[in-house]
């Protein structure tokens, strides 16, 4: 008598639907809306969290001068840089980090969706999934490094020609947990690759 599988086709469909919905939401809120904001068709992103070089508020003379550039800075050390009426280039600089991060996340979700589809046959240990895991691991690693750098670079581009430039630090904070996650996914991809190779070798002996 056969053993009933713990994973059914219904489970696969539900997982695929959840991943598909997540991909759509990321595409809409992380890419489409920011792009429309850059184009001026919807309210754009107008705030960027920045790090100042002091634990106290930036001097009033500096903030008053920056106001002439359409910028205000609220808070100290970890502060919010608000652009009153950002132009096209400013809207683009504000949107680039979020758009890029969402694009990389969308790639991961698409790869996960393709992996989920292999569950329909009850077998995820296929060569394609090993490659997908490797791509996902590299994508997470790129995201962990690129996102903070993009935020720092675009922030400096926003304030470079304003009185705020001397008070807002070039700050890129990297998260070790995302780097660790990337290497774990890469390691899992290698496990999949070795597992599929071993199975292929075993089947060749039969």
Image: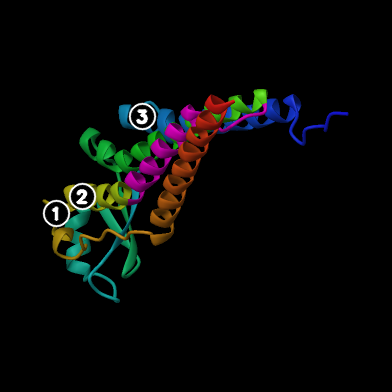
- What SS does tag 1 mark? loop
Q: Nearer the observer, disc 1 or disc 3?
A: 3
Quadrant where the image shows the C terminus? top right
Q: Nearer the observer, disc 1 or disc 2?
A: 2
Q: Which residues are magenta?
A: 122-144
Q: Is residue 100 visible?
A: yes
Q: Nearer the viewer, residue 180 or 64?
A: 180
Q: Is residue 81 left or right of residue 156?
A: right
Percent position of residue 88, x then y: 24, 33
Question: Which quadrant would residue 80 be assigned to in this image?
Answer: bottom left
User: Callout 3: few (<14), some (14-19), or many (20+) C-alpha neighbours within 10 Å?
Assistant: many
Looking at the image, which residue is at 82% across and 32% down?
Answer: 4
What is the chief secondary structure element of the magenta stretch?
helix
Q: Please say if 24 is above or below 179.
A: above
- Magenta segment: does it hold 126? yes
Percent position of residue 52, x then y: 25, 67
Quadrant where the image shows the N terminus? top right
Q: Please say if 54 is above or below 126.
A: below
Which residue is tagged 1?
162
How far apart are the two marked residues, 3 and 2, measured between alpha carbons? 19 Å
Q: Are marks 1 and 2 in contact (CB under 8 Å)?
A: no
Looking at the image, which residue is at 83% across and 33% down?
Answer: 3
- What SS does tag 2 mark? helix
Which residue is tagged 2?
153
Percent position of residue 188, x then y: 49, 45
Q: Is residue 28 visible?
A: no
Counting residues from the start of the chain, the first of labels 1 and 3 encountered is 3
Which residue is tagged 3?
35
């Amino acid at each position: 008598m056969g053993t009933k599988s713990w994973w059914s086709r219904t489970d696969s469909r539900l997982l695929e639907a959840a991943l598909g919905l997540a991909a759509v939401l990321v595409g809409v809120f992380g890419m489409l809306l920011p792009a429309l904001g850059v184009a001026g068709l919807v309210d754009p992103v107008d705030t960027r969290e920045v790090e100042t070089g002091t634990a106290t508020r930036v001097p009033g003379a500096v903030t008053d001068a920056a106001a002439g550039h359409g910028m205000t800075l609220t808070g100290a050390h970890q502060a919010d840089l608000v652009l009153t009426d950002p132009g096209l280039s400013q809207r683009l600089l504000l949107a680039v980090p979020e758009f890029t991060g969402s694009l990389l996340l969308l790639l991961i979700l698409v790869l996960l969706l393709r992996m989920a589809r292999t569950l329909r046959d009850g077998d995820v240990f296929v060569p394609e999934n090993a490659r997908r895991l490797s791509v996902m691991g590299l994508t997470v690693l790129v995201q962990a490094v690129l996102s903070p750098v993009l935020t720092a670079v675009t922030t400096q581009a926003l304030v470079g020609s304003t009185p705020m430039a001397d008070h807002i630090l070039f700050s890129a904070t990297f998260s070790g947990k995302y780097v660790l996650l990337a290497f774990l996914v890469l390691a899992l991809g290698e496990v999949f690759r070795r597992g599929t190779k071993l199975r292929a070798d075993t089947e060749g002996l039969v």
